[in-house]
């Protein structure tokens, strides 16, 4: 059965983040009322506050996109924050949705939930079949707990809570922090600043050999809405493009798009992380969803947005330079 979003009250938890903002944009096509709440008005790590907010605003459905996110450096530096905050956020929202009889909830996880040496491409049934990648295990453990919470509330209480696992995302509103950002945002900023400063070289972490899959955030938002409307099951769904590229080739692609003509140098003292991460999205494809953006077009649009607006954790001085 299709879940009709027309005239529904939909809470996008984490609307200021890259994915949450994209979901808000996508919901403009659905004829629904979008509920958002600023971070300074609702601390999602405080259970009582979350329950009070949900009871007062009475959303019909929830997209749980709120999370503390970051790259390898951030995960290694702030393990307690990544584990505690993500556990608290998802537990509070999922439980509040249950006790307030929210009709449907979509929880957003991460492809880092899969074992470090999982078969490629990674299928949904590969979850918990081996040890995690140590560089982001804190975040991964929290996201696995979120999946299991949705499954547990469905099993015990009959809640229509489902989960989706996105591949690596990029797009408007990404975090361009020089140390705590993910690969696409980090490279866009690094190559842009190198071009502006006319630097002779840009350093990237590791060998450049790892293979990654990258998807535009607006495709992820579209997939989330599709799942909300068309899917109800215990099993979570992978969301990806099915295409992969080496970090080295990706860096060269970003450099070319930005217009940087210097040298790309590898810092072999830095970790590579998991050597290959490609998710199998065939189950979602089988339901009728397909991504729309090519990597080239998506990156070009992202860089244009970066030059015009900057991104989160990109201060006013740097925006002016951009």
Image (cartoon, rainbow, N blue to C red):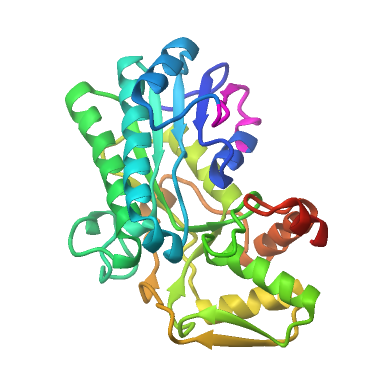
* In the image, residue 36 lies in the stretch drawn in magenta: yes
| Residue 275 % position (x, y) | 37, 76
Q: Residue at x 46, y 39 (%)?
A: 66
| Residue 97 % position (x, y) | 36, 22
> Horizontally, is 38 left or right of 120 in the view?
right
> Horizontally, is 316 left or right of 70 in the view?
right
Q: Nearer the viewer, residue 235 or 23?
A: 23
Q: Is residue 212 above or below residue 236?
A: below
| Residue 150 % position (x, y) | 28, 34
Q: Residue at x 29, y 66 (%)?
A: 134
Residue 15 occupies quadrant: top right
> Which quarter of the figure is the C terminus placed in?
bottom right
Main SS of residues in magenta: loop
> Horizontally, is 128 left or right of 80 in the view?
left
Residue 176 occupies quadrant: bottom right
Q: Is residue 55 above or below residue 154?
A: above
Q: Nearer the viewer, residue 180 or 241?
A: 180
């Amino acid at each position: 059965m299709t879940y009709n979003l027309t005239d529904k009250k939909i809470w996008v938890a984490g609307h200021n983040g890259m994915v949450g903002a994209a979901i808000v944009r996508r919901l403009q096509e659905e004829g629904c009322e979008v509920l958002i709440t600023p971070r300074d008005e609702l601390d999602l790590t405080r259970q009582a506050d979350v329950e009070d907010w949900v009871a007062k605003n009475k959303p019909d459905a929830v997209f749980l996109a709120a999370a503390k996110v970051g790259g390898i450096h951030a995960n290694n530096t702030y393990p307690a924050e990544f584990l505690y905050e993500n556990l608290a956020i998802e537990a509070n929202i999922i439980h509040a949705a249950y006790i307030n009889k929210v009709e449907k909830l979509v929880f957003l996880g991460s492809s880092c939930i899969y074992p470090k040496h999982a078969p490629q491409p990674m299928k949904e049934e590969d979850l918990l079949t081996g040890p995690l990648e140590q560089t982001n295990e804190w975040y991964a453990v929290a996201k696995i707990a979120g999946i299991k919470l949705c499954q547990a509330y469905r099993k015990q209480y009959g809640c229509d809570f489902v989960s989706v696992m996105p591949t690596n995302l990029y797009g408007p509103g990404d975090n361009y922090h020089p140390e705590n950002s993910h690969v696409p945002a980090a490279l866009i900023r690094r190559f842009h600043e190198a071009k502006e400063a006319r630097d002779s070289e840009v350093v990237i972490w590791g060998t450049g050999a790892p293979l990654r899959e990258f998807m535009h955030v607006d495709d992820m938002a579209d997939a989330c809405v599709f799942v909300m409307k068309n899917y109800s099951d215990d099993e979570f769904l992978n969301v990806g493009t099915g295409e992969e590229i080496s970090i080295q080739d990706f860096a060269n692609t970003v450099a070319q798009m930005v217009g940087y003509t210097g040298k790309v140098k590898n810092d072999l003292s830095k970790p590579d992380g998991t050597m290959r991460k490609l998710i199998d999205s065939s189950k979602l494809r089988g339901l009728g969803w397909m991504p729309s953006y090519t990597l080239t077009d998506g990156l070009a649009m992202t860089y244009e947005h970066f030059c015009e607006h900057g991104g989160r954790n990109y201060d006013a001085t740097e925006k002016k330079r951009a």
